Amino acid sequence: MRSSDIVRIARQRAGLTQQQLAHRSGHPRETIARWETGAREPSLESLRALVRACGLELVLALAEGDDSLTGLVDDQLALAPADRLRRLLPADEASWALRALAWLAAARTPSIVVGGVAAALQGAPQRPRDGGVEVVASDPLALTSEMEAGGLEATDSHERFADSDRRWPWKLRGGGTIVLAGALPGSGDFADLRRSAQQLDVDGMSVRVAHPRDLLRLADASARESERSRVPGLGALLSQVSATA
């Protein structure tokens, strides 16, 4: 991960604008912007101070080199997005995930795919927990109405009403699950994620998927072990994507 990624992830996780971070850190906003784009590299001392201004701590550690994740990411990036998903999931779960993505691609309410399926579509090497497709919607009530009208069946979940990290699964007839997510830690949901979200071609369907940088930010901020376990793979993916950008 590059220093530009660290600056942006820390700022976005803290919910700050560049101007607000500039005020907190004492650096000009233009300097913050150059650090985020990679036009300039902050010193290690400046980087740590900037992260601290976001209410976070930059933890550095030395470890044995491991190129295995890099190789796995390269293998995934060589495939089309749908094939990345098929490679990581059993055939039935991959089929259900693609059915859910097809439904979302046809829906009127804009949404952004997050979670394990999004990570797989972008090229992360770790297997999603299952084929459930997690999304954040521009208008959750509108998407809920569409799912009801489309014959999807809501699943009772105590996480539906959680103050943070909400989840509400909806099952498609014939297989497949769409999980409506909201109040995600480290994120401002749709309005936040749409700035960097990417349109991916998934078997001819245009699907909006969160950027690897944002997926890493969400995984790192999550209290869920299933989310945090994706951090190494997403870090390797972001390094590869940044290197070729």
Image: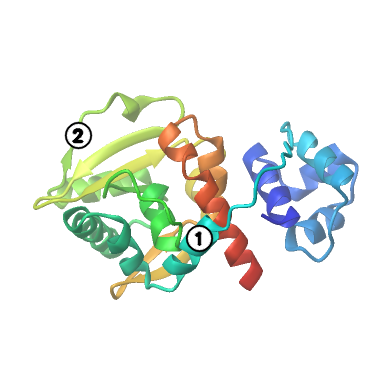
* Mark 2, residue position: 155
Q: In the rendered view, does 22 fall on the left or right side of 243?
A: right
Q: Residue at x 51, y 41 (%)?
A: 219
Q: Residue at x 79, y 35 (%)?
A: 53
Figure disc tally: 2
SS state under label 1:
loop
In x, y percent, where is residue 103? 23, 59
Return the residue nearer the eye: 62 or 144. Answer: 62
In x, y percent, where is residue 57? 73, 33
Q: In the rendered view, does 61 fall on the left or right side of 78?
A: right
Q: If the image is split into quadrants, where does the C terminus sit?
A: bottom right
* Mark 1, residue position: 197
**Three-letter amino acid code at the position of disc 1:** Ala
In x, y percent, where is residue 111? 38, 55
Q: Is residue 122 above or below residue 229?
A: below
Return the residue nearer the eye: 202 or 193. Answer: 202
SS state under label 2:
loop
